Structure formats: structure tokens, C-alpha cells
Amino acid sequence: MAEHPKELQSERRIFCNRTLNLRSIKAIGFDMDYTLVHYNVQAWEGRAFDYTKENLAEMGYNVGDLKFDPSFVNRGLVIDRKKGNLLKANRFGYIKAAAHGTEMVEFRQMRKMYRQTTVDLSNSRYYFLNTLFSLSEASIYSQMVDKLDSGTLTAGDDSPIMGYAELHDLVRKALDQAHVEGKLKADILADPAHFIEEDPELIPTLLDIKATGKKLLLITNSGYYYTKNVMDYLFEGKLPNKMKWNDLFDISIVSARKPAFFQSKPPVFEVINEDGHLQPMQGKLQAGKTYLGGYAKLIEKSLKVRGDQILYVGDHIYGDVHVSKALSQWRTCLVVRELEREVKAIAAGQKASDTIAKLMNKKKCLEHEFSATKLQRLRIKSDLFDDQGSAEDLKKKMDSIRQELIAIDDEIRPYASTDGHGFNKKWGYMLRTGNDKSHMTRQIERHADLYTSRVSNLLHYTPFMYFRAARGALPHDCEGSYYY
């Protein structure tokens, strides 16, 4: 029996940004990669890294010594293509941490470098690492920046090396080539158990949704052959009544070309046999069939539903949830696999966080007392006010308060310097930047109605759940700790 949400572990919960009543949802669509299918990140991205290296080596670059380091990068960072840096920004776009190549930039140097700069993702200077597919890309790019700076990155013909932006273009080209050539996906199909992490609660989750009469949709950018084999691996022989995966999903669309899926109306083809043979689609999309290509309005027309009656679940902030919501008014749920690890890290660090909060409250009171004393002393020195006491006594008091503040800072420092290290020792938490929300959190808030760590978390809420957004804390709320 499914756990009641109250007893559910925090890391398996579904979090709500915008109120959503599942009773109003007529169809739920799912992306496949890193949504329905969870990959072993070390295995998948490590192999992607290796093939990218191979492609760069074939272009003549000396990259044989590069090694995949998933601990150095995490989703939500931003590549500054102008300076060759990795950045972590807060929700306002202000940079709070940076690395040049594989070395973290010292705080004062980082502040000087980015004092008048904010991250603007509409600017081609910045590249947002918004999926787990980005990890191999960022890892190899940061190491190549090191080689570029040291003068040891050379092409076969000893030609001059490009700048940081061109270097990123080169890495993107090599990585895209690794995906297009199909070697990576061929490896996965040859040994799926090594790359795919199965979730025993996935099938019960989907069966529950289907039992309510809601339509199940599969909408993936992966091609038919890869999709069929991965879905066969996940579902073959595990569904009731000899069902196959394409019986479970009312409509399956491969090679969807998201985000264009939500923007254009390309030709649509029906997959007519297991060999992937195609014929032009006739009329509307038919239940239980698989199609190559398609578009959002065709889904709505075929199912006779409005866009806001469809919930789409995916892992890509832009391609899955931003565009589907902005252009089609589909409701959205973002899968953030790392959320489980982050929530556990936050819980483990709660005692330290509470200590920091207590010390900061004490510091805030002392700072106010110091400022009031300083003002009183200035009043005396200005000779514009009646007797306010002894300036010398006030100076002694200020010196005493200053020493207390220094002592508090010394007490806070070891806690603050390791805050978030349970998630990532270099960058801290993915969704927080110090006391503020991270830039990635801002993207999630703007574009995802719901977010959670995996599809099967829906199992514990039922398909009739009414998700209500929490009342947001504002600086002027009396019960908050944001006012002075």
C-alpha cells in the first residue's frame, strides 16, 4: 500500500510552485530519457565524455589525458563563454561562485571580475547547464580551458588555438557528434543493465494513472529504434495481461524534436511495424500507435482536450517545461533527479544551519547596537545636540561590540564555509546560493508547476491529488525573519 504523503520521505515528495488539481488533468505526457528512464550518471556521462574525447582526438587535439570528474560540476551552473569560467548565480543573476577551468576563483577576485555583471541567459555569452546530459560537456570543457591557458592544447597541425567561446563550440560539436553517430546509445542497448537504473515503482505509477481513465503519452526526442529497445527493456514481461509498452501509452511519439514540437507543425508519420517502417499519418493520432514527429496542437485535437488539461513531465527546463507551458499552456512537472541527494544533504546539515541562524540573529542585534552607538558618538562630536554622554565611553563600547562581532564571524566561518558540502564540496547546494535561491531554482519556479525527483513519486499521491502551492514568505510578513 502506498504511503500517505505525510509519512513520505522528504526526498520523495512532490513540490508545488503553482496550484494544480490532477482531477482537471485529462492526459499526462512523459519524456523518456532521465524522466521515465533513469540512467546511471557516472556510466552514461562517463561514456559520453569518452566519445567526445575520441572525436576531439580525431580532429587532432591532444586530449588523451582528460578524465571525467562528475564531482566537479553539477546541473544549474552556467558557462561564461567569454571568460572560460563556470559560474554559480543566485536568482537575480548575481555571480556568487566561479571557477576558471578546474580551479575555483578566489572570492575577492571573483567579485572584482563580476562586480557589474549579471547572468542573462538570453545572452549567447552564457550557456546554462540545465540537464544531466550537461555534466560531461562541462567536465571536458573546464579541463580544455586549463590546457588552453597553459599553452598545451594543440591541434595536429600546430595551428593557433581559438578563444574560450570557440573552444566551447568545439566541445559542443564533438559531443553532438557522439550522440548523432549513435555509438553511445548502441553501448546502452548492448548492456542496458549497466546504464539504466530501474525503478520498481514506475509501472504501478503508470498503471494507476491509466486506471483513472487519464491518457498516457510518451513524447521523446529519441528515435524509434532506441526508444523501442529501451522501453522493451523496462516493460517487457512486467505489465499485466500481456500488455506491451505501446499498449500502456495511448499515444507514443518518437523523434519529437522538442522544443520545436511545441512551436511548429511538421509532417507526421505512423510507425507501422517493429522494424520502424513508416507511412504518412492519416487523420488523427490513434490510440496505441507510435508516431514519428508530431506537434502539441495535434495531440490536443486528437484527444479533444485543451492545453491546460495536459500535464507534461520532463527533465529539461527549456525543452520540456518552459516551452510547453509558454506556447501550449500545458501544465508542467520537472524531474530533478539530484533532488533526493540535495534534500538528504539539507537534512544532514540542519543542525549547522540552525547554528548559523542563531549566530546571525545575535550578530544582527549587535550590528544595530553598534550603529546606534556610533550615531550617538557622532551627535556629540557634531556639537549640534544636547549632551549625549561621553564620546570616549561610547568609543570603548563600540570597540567592545566590534570584538564581539569578530568573535561571532569566527564562530560562523567554519559552518558557513562547509554549508552545502554534503551535496557538492566546491559549489554547495544545487538549489541554494548561500541564504538565497540559486539561478536554477528561479528557472524551476518560473517554468515548472510541480517538481520532484522521479516519476514514481506520483504513486504516493494518487492521480486525484490537489497540489496547492505554499503561501510564499515575503520580507514584510510579520512571522518571517526577513525584516529588521
Image: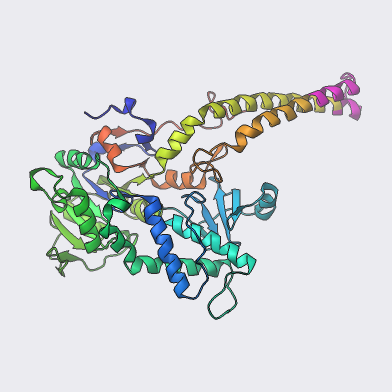
| Apparent side of residue 422 relative to residue 178 in the rendered image (left or right) | right
Q: Is residue 134 above or below residue 216?
A: below
Q: In this view, does 167 lie above or below 453?
A: below
Q: Which residue is located at x 60 percent, y 77 percent?
A: 160
Magenta stretch, main secondary structure class: helix
Q: Report the colour scheme.
A: rainbow
- The question of residue 261 being in magenta is answered with no
Quadrant that contains the N terminus: top left
Magenta span of residues:
378-400
Residue visible at 88% across and 18% down?
389
Task: Name the residue located 54 percent from the left edge and 76 percent from the top edge.
Answer: 155
| Residue 125 horizontal/vertical position (percent) | 55, 62
Tell me where residue 421 sits by quadrant.
top right
Residue 447 in view: yes
Picture layout, residue 283 above or below residue 479: below
At x 55%, y 81%, the residue is 157
Coordinates of residue 74 in the picture (x, y in percent): 48, 49
Q: Which quadrant holds the C terminus?
A: top right
Q: How far across and how far down the image is residue 347, in percent?
A: 47, 30
Residue 80 position, x and y percent, is 56, 59
Tell which residue pokes out farthest to the left in this image.
Answer: 241
* Residue 396 colored in magenta in the image: yes
Q: Is residue 52 left or right of residue 1?
A: right
Q: In this view, does 289 lie to the left or right of 67?
A: left
